[in-house]
Image (spheres, rainbow, N blue to C red):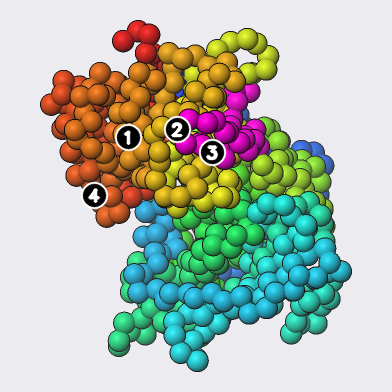
Amino acid sequence: MITPDSAVLSITELPITDYSAQLLAMNHHHIVQLSTVMSSLLMACATAATLGATPSPQAAAALRAAAEPLTPRKAPTGHLSNYDESKVGNHILPDPLVLHNGEPVRDPETWLNIRRAEILKLYETEIFGSVPSTAPKMKFEVVKTDTNAMGGSAIRKDIVARMGDGPDAPKVNVVLYLPANAKQPSPVLLHLLFGNPPVSDPGAVSSGTNRPPEHGPIRDILARGYGYASFRYTEIEGDGKTNNVNIARRLALAAGQTEPVTGEWGTITAWAWGASCVLDFLQEDGDVDMHRVALIGHSRLGKTALWAGARDPRFALVFASCSGEMGASLSRRDFGESLDDVIANFPRWMVSGFLKFSGRWNDIPVDSHMIIALNAPRPVFITGGTDDLWADPYGQFLAQVAAGPVYRLLGKRDLGTTEMPLDKPLISGELGFHLHTGGHSITAEDWKAFLDFADGQLKSKSTQKAQRFEKKITVTAKFNYLLSLPEDYTKSKTKWPLVMFLHGSGESGKNIHKVKTHGPAKLADVNGPFPFILVSPQSARRGWDPDKLNALLDAVIKKYRVDKDRVYLTGLSMGGYGTWDLAAAYPEKFAAIAPICGGGDPSDAPAIAKLPIWVFHGAKDKTVPLDRSEKMVEAVKAAGGNPKFTVYPDAAHDSWRQTYNDPEFYKWLLAQNRGKR
């Protein structure tokens, strides 16, 4: 048994486990053979070689040269800043893969459902603070659209967000550039800025400043197919010693309050909250791909970006530049800016109780590798500069190395090396890093490396192609549908399982890309093909017609190599209702069904009683009450069936997220065979 006191990692002894051998051969993106992972992990922890991370000779030389002229700074605690690697001292990191009770995290589900929540809670209570329920509401308005921006290469939208009502409501100005000739919604890079968003000419000096613009290379960004959005962080909340409860945090105060109560948000959480509010708007903009919005921040805004990504899993990728102490740099490591410096100079950033860690660095219950890990399995890109020793670029690299085991547990790739190179970006995995020659800035080389990294992570991996089906029955059945074929479909004559996925009412209509909003259709678009044929039809109107769906199913089975004994049906919400209805009308077609947060006609139960059925619902679902599923399960049992029934106690209507992200669901589904019943 690992006890809490021993649940640590030495920074020079990081266990490395290769989980690739534990992944099912059919598709490592989706199905993890959990029992194999759990047994082999125990062995690997005891037998894997340990690793010492180091800078390359070139990087080490550049860092030493930068340190020579530096004068140590003295913190109020008396601590002198250190720039000598030989004086860093020994430090021990909390292990992200050990639960609070001392049990090891052996599988992705334990990380995603338990350990991640534990770490997130520690950051909320001890580090950055939580967003209060009284946080103001933001209302967005597009006040101007220029369809001929940047010489016709872009569409520019000027957006104003207001916190609250009334003419004096605080405003946040957001600027969004989109590729002019995009044929489908564009991925967007959302950039937190110190200054104002770019003026009409992105090459001009930032409005209100006399310095070169800090915004990204917008023309290059657009040329790669991305949109670019930005806003000024101090329009969310101030960042001075005396004006930091001035906007969002002030509006959240109760009568008589002058500052947030213990445990509530510091300014970093307020800025992260603001980024999520802007994301709310972007996800409603039909020109933006809601699933591919990345967040960018530099320095203290790099800390903000990491925390925003940890808080809000809707951000598809995070780029944290030179984020330093309480960002990506390890706090226990005595190098450059220290915990004492942050507490003395920027207490407003953190939760009020954070001050107790001054001079007690090893008492802090988390470290920066854990905020990186909170973003897993989503990609994180981190940069540092050789002359920016205050932000400890090597400490940022070490934190990514220490976050690697979490990414590997989730089937993702880490940095791929333990040696920190100089001016050579590491971008082959979901963790990316670049040490540039230079100081505290996002350099042109950083931007290029980041865009290359983003191309590998955000550019669509979809193998699904929009298809159209039409067949004359008693009426004409027409569908637009998405088709995803297994990666090896064309390499053999094997017959494949088939899963039909029925979407919810919000995805109805004529825009086939809306079908990718949730469920398997979304996962196939993000992660690549499943080890089965996936058919995701779109209902033009609300509701599903079983006869028309059956006609589509027959056509697909005829056209593609389908194992007829392994045809499965699942759907969510309106699609959950459709799953019950279609299975009842054509029970002979399916090897198993999995309706999620839907309902059906209990009188249909005898027709499907012999089918393997797994039903899912959220106990807090107010859209489709839990009793809709309960009645169907009871009816099937009364008819002689034996359905599985999972109720998520804390889930609302979006219970499909847990279901479709659970490898055990696919393992069970694909194990059902109509010919062996």
Q: Is residue 70 above or below residue 5?
A: below
Residue for point 70% across, 47% down? 454
Residue 426 place in picture, x, y as percent: 73, 40
Query: In which quarter of the view is residue 419 placed?
Result: top right
Q: CA distance from mark 4 to mark 3?
A: 31 Å
Q: Is residue 385 visible?
A: no
Mark 1 or mark 2, earlier in chain: 2
Query: As displayed, is residue 168 above or below residue 213?
Result: below
Q: Nearer the viewer, mark 3 or mark 2?
A: 2
| Numbered label attached to residue 625 | 4
Query: Furthest-front residue in view?
Result: 474
Q: Secondary structure at mark 1?
A: helix
If the image is split into quadrants, where does the C terminus sit?
A: top left
Using a 10 Å C-alpha cutoff, classify the residue at mark 1 as few (fewer than 14 neighbours), some (14 to 19) or many (20 or more). many
Q: Which residues are magenta?
A: 461-487
Mark 4 or mark 3: which is in front?
A: 3
In the rendered view, does 286 fall on the left or right side of 128?
Answer: right
Residue at 48%, 74% in the rendered image: 138
- Quadrant containing the N terminus in the rendered view: top left
Q: Earlier in the sequence, mark 1 or mark 4?
A: 1
Q: Is residue 27 above or below residue 492?
A: below
- Rounded to the nearest angstrom, the CA distance separating label 1 from label 4 is 18 Å
How far from the left and from the top, in percent, is residue 38? 40, 22
Membership of 136 in magenta stretch: no
Q: Which of 228/448 is in front?
A: 228
Q: Which mark is residue 437?
A: none
- Give the spatial CA distance, label 4 vs label 2: 35 Å
